[in-house]
Amino acid sequence: MPSVHLHYWAGARAAAGTTAEEVEAATVRQALERAAAGRDARFARVLAACSLLVDGTAAHADDLDTPLTGAVRVEVLPPFAGGAEPSAV
């Protein structure tokens, strides 16, 4: 299974309790689900509001189920100002 490096920013970092972590997963959605497992509901709420960049490209809900063919870096970016539409994580 590919390696997914999750890098958390700002409020996502605070909710995750770490700057980054690496999980093995077949899709980005699966990586996020594995990261959320064992964490409190606050982390899930923050994660749902975040934007995601996968290897520097904005990811949308439909992109999260694309099978991974190699290692990726996912930037987990909470809304910084003005609010945002929650993503379907």
Image: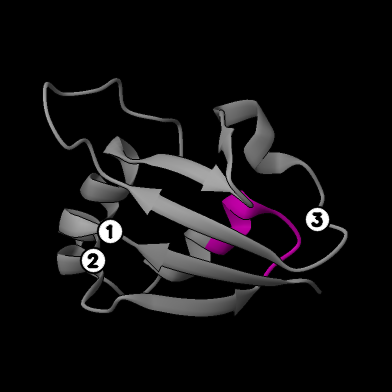
Whether the residues at callouts 2 and 1 have beta carbons within 8 Å, the answer is: yes
Residue linked to disc 3: 68
* Above or below: residue 8 compared with residue 18: above
Query: Is tag 1's residue or tag 3's residue first in the polypeptide sequence?
Result: 1
Q: Which amino acid does label 2 sit on?
A: Arg
Residue displayed at 47% across by 43% down: 52
SS at badge 1? loop
* Above or below: residue 25 compared with residue 64: below
* Above or below: residue 3 compared with residue 51: below
Q: Residue 78 vs residue 89: left or right? A: left
Quadrant assignment, res 81: top left
Q: Which mark is residue 13?
A: 2
Residue linked to disc 1: 9
Residue displayed at 61% across by 58% down: 30
Quadrant assignment, res 88: top left
Residue furthest to the front? 56
Instruction: Tell me where the magenta segment starts and ends, as one range.
Output: 25-31
